[in-house]
Image (cartoon, rainbow, N blue to C red):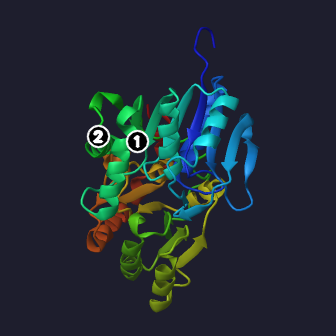
Amino acid sequence: MGDQEIHRVLMVSDFFYPNFGGVENHIYYLSQCLLKLGHKVVVMTHAYGNRSGVRYMTGGLKVYYVPWRPFFLQNTLPTFYGTLSIVRTILIRERISLVHGHQAFSTLCHEALMHARTMGYKVVFTDHSLYGFADVGSIHMNKVLQFTLADVSQAICVSHTSKENTVLRSGLPPEKVFVIPNAVDTAMFKPASERLNGNEIVIVVISRLVYRKGADLLVEVIPEVCRLYPNVRFIVGGDGPKRVRLEEMREKHSLQDRVEMLGAVPHARVRSVLISGHIFLNSSLTEAFCIAILEAASCGLLTVSTRVGGVPEVLPDDMIVLAEPDPSDMVQAIRKAISILPNIDPQVMHFRVSAFP
């Protein structure tokens, strides 16, 4: 380490393992990288079911599952000062030097940042999502963000689009906000050793099946693509309230043999699902970055995605086909992707992703 300063970092968010998602993976892998550099990292999140108290993960990562229960979308009930005692205890016990909060929608993150600044700690905030300005929920969230980030040391966003959004919502000076794109461990996402059968085209979807991820678009897009291409099959991984609509669509159009529903896919199994396909389909209505696209490209899949948020910043134009979040435009994008599929070499695509700065 030489003369490099050693930090003791507290990662705080309502979103962490055993829950699965982009924020959870980001916190875990960032923590592992910091541990390898010799820093001390501790994670604080709320209890998940019977998982409460202190747990240890790979590399000696210490996780505090505080005895707070989520009340809405994995978020704890806002208390302002209800978490002060336990946050203060962790900060002192672990001799923390820096607090890093993740996700604007996390109640625990906001409260921990507020208490840490009150106690004089340096705090960093990472925003992983885009939010609007007009609806009631966004107006409320933006007010909370302005209050919490009024005295933050630095802020990080995962794309330039996300930075613009965060600066406008929070009122932070742009020079305090840095863009650090998400990264993927390409060693974990390698293409299949043998190329797939070209007679059948498999389109893979791995996403939470919720409105924000465009699950309603899939309901309209999948039957039309299946009608146009008898040799196309879909694999849908993920769970959520919109799964019922996809199941109904499959029944209505008699696509049981062409649309495979996997349910929730653990991150350890994501690669095995991806390498069984040729095209990765992302239908998000809003997205700050979308790490799933990068994982799919690393596995050698051509990506079709909605042109929203920071998605156009993720991959070069020849590795992704973009479409407006409209069913007909997405079908046209899939048709274009199928036409250029013979020119795609999964191994070359993997090496290109590995070489990204």
Nearest the camera: 233 or 167? 167
Residue pointed to by mark 1: 148
> In the image, what residue occupies the spot 55% across and 64% down?
71
Q: Are marks 1 and 2 in contact (CB under 8 Å)?
A: no
Query: Relative to 175, is 145 above or below?
Result: below
Is 270 left, or right, of 279 in this rendering? right
Query: Relative to 328, is 267 above or below?
Result: above
Is 103 left, or right, of 132 in this rendering? right
Query: Relative to 95, is 262 above or below?
Result: below
Q: Position of residue 342 (x, y in %)?
A: 42, 58
Q: Quadrant of residue 256?
A: bottom right
Nearest the camera: 90 or 80? 80
Q: Position of residue 315 (x, y in %)?
A: 37, 45
Answer with mark 1 or mark 2, whichever residue precedes in sequence: 1
Residue pointed to by mark 2: 167
> In the image, what residue occupies the spot 36% across and 73% down?
217
Nearest the camera: 107 or 163? 107
Q: Quadrant of the N terminus?
A: top right
Disc 2 crowd, CA 10 A, few/some/many (<14, 14-19, 20+): some
Q: Amino acid at mark 1?
A: Thr
Disc 1 crowd, CA 10 A, few/some/many (<14, 14-19, 20+): many
Asked which secondary structure carries label 2, the reply is helix
Q: Is residue 276 visible?
A: no
Q: Quadrant of the C terminus?
A: top left
Q: Position of residue 335 (x, y in %)?
A: 33, 68
Asked which secondary structure carries label 1, the reply is helix
